[in-house]
Each structure stands twice: as structure tokens, then as C-alpha cells.
Amino acid sequence: MPGIQHSDQDQLHYDGVYQATKKNGSIYYRASLTYRNKHISLGSYPSAVSAHEAYLEGLQLLNSQTSLMDYRSNARLLFEKWVILLNFRDNNIYFGTPIYVGQKMFYYYLSPTHVLKFDMDDLFYFASHKIMCRGTHYFVADYGMQVNIASRFGIKNYAVPGKDFRFLNQDPTDFRRENLEILNTFHGVTLEQQKGKYIYTVRIHLNGNYLVGRYTQEWEAAIAYNKAIDILKRNGVTKSFTPNYIEGISPREYADIYTKVKISPKLSDYHPS
């Protein structure tokens, strides 16, 4: 740990330290260790001394009662590596992402104070997908694309918290399914309460929100949105809209609802300027 003094020649003989060369010819040092027959990389360092200190810190974590609460900003290893090592030590399963497994759920640490919670059913997905954060939005890289993790839980990319979905315990980092309530499943459809009754209000965006109509059934509202798209296209609107895909009804039932559902005249008469 800090305070170790060795000559440059001796640095090459530290346990767990390997010299490597960058493409530009400069030298750096990699630290690694083996625990329970698992070879674990600890990262890259500018000197053999710092790499060896990381190696010693890794051994100390794996062979003590150290907890994540003991992490300090001057630690040699990244906090992410602390999570990975302590989970391996305590739960005997190695993940390459900062996951710590608890009882009936697991924790994904973005930082010591920023922790996401998930059901065990999602464990192996997030064990192989690194979560990135942009504000209150969380993404993973999947087949070269950034995918919003909310979509895994049936939450649309355009969904607004509190309007289209909500966290029942008011914790926006708790993605356990029992804590998520989807309020609005379809594009353009919002569940609203008016005069003590719940109705589905449909709006479509055209230089502002246009009211399509209000409906008592969610399927009816979703189909009304699709019908509005078709009307606007016939009227010459070139803007791209995503139609609602409705499962559980036959083509005949869909066509029957489509024919009967009423659309606001203001929308039917809309023409692009």
C-alpha cells in the first residue's frame, strides 16, 4: 500500500503486476489476481507500484470483512471493482458489471450513492449489459444501439413519469416489477379522471397537441389514434407517426372498432399549411 519503496528494476517483480505497451510505445502496468480459480483483471496503472497497490487492495477485499460502506475516494481500485469483488466474495458468482446480489433482488451500483434495484429475473441480463446514465434516463448498449432500460419493463421511450407510469414506492431507482405501474400503454393515449370517472384521452402532436377524442375503452382509444394517423396522411401530412400495435383482438374486431370510432372534426379537417 502507500509508502512502499522499490527501485525501477524491482518493480517488474511485484506479484500480480504485468508490464504492457501501448500502441505509441509507452509502458503501463496491469494488475490482476486469481480467486477461487477465477482470473480477475483489476485495471491499468501508470506505475508498477500503483498496480501492486491495487493488487494488494483486491486481495484485502476478498479476504476480509470489508463492506461497500468502507469505500473511500482514495481507494486504489475503482468503486465498480469493489462491488464486483465483494459480490464474488459473498455470493460466489462473478459478474463483470457492478452488481451485488441480495435476497430476492439485486443492486446495480452506478456510484456509492446511486443504486438501482431489480428483480432476480433480470440478473443475467444486466450482468452482461453495462448501464449508462443520462440524467434520469438509463441505457444499455445492445447490438450497437443505446436501449432505454425502461423498455424492458413495458415503458415506452416517450413515457412521462407520473403520467404514463409510476413507481409505487416513490423511488425512481427501484425497477422491480412489483413497484412499477404502467398507466398508459399506447401512443397518444392518456388515462385521465373527469367528474369522478376514468376516461382515455387521445392527442396527437401537430405543431402542438390536437385532441383526437375521449373514449371509455383503452383499445378504442389506441385504434382512434391509428385512425387519426390515417386521416392526417390522407390530408397531406408527411410527419411520421408510430401507430399502436394492439394484441388480443382479431382483424375483424379491429376493423369494426376502427369504422365506428369517432375522431374530432378539427382533426379531420386539418391540412398542412
Image (cartoon, helix red, strand yellow):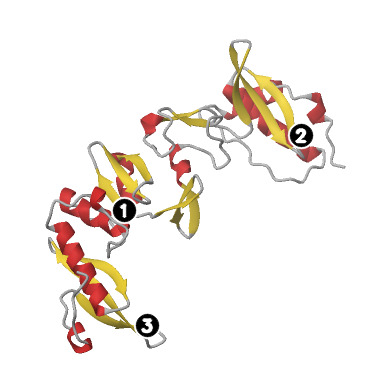
Task: Find residue 243 and report its horizontal and vertical position in percent.
Answer: 63, 38
Q: Quadrant of residue 4?
A: bottom left
Task: Find residue 203 and report its horizontal and vertical position in percent.
Answer: 69, 30
**Which amino acid, by three-letter code, is at mark 1?**
Pro
- Residue 134 visible in image: yes
Which mark is first along the chain, 2 or 1? 1
Please give left or right for residue 242 compared with residue 99 in the image.
right
Q: Residue furthest top?
A: 196
How busy is the neighbourhood of tag 2: few (under 14 within 10 Å), some, or many (20 plus)?
A: some
Label total for image: 3
The residue that appears at 31% across and 40% down in the rendered structure is 121
Q: Nearer the viewer, mark 3 or mark 2?
A: 3
> Which residue position is annotated with label 3?
22
**Disc sitting over residue 231 in the figure:** 2
**Which amino acid, by three-letter code, is at mark 2?**
Ile
Between residue 155 and residue 263, name the one nearer to us: 155
> Which residue position is annotated with label 1?
98
Alpha carbon distance from label 3 to label 2: 60 Å
Task: Find residue 202 and report its horizontal and vertical position in percent.
Answer: 66, 27
Which mark is first along the chain, 2 or 3? 3
**Disc sitting over residue 150 in the figure:** none
Alpha carbon distance from label 1 to label 3: 27 Å
Q: Residue furthest right?
A: 273
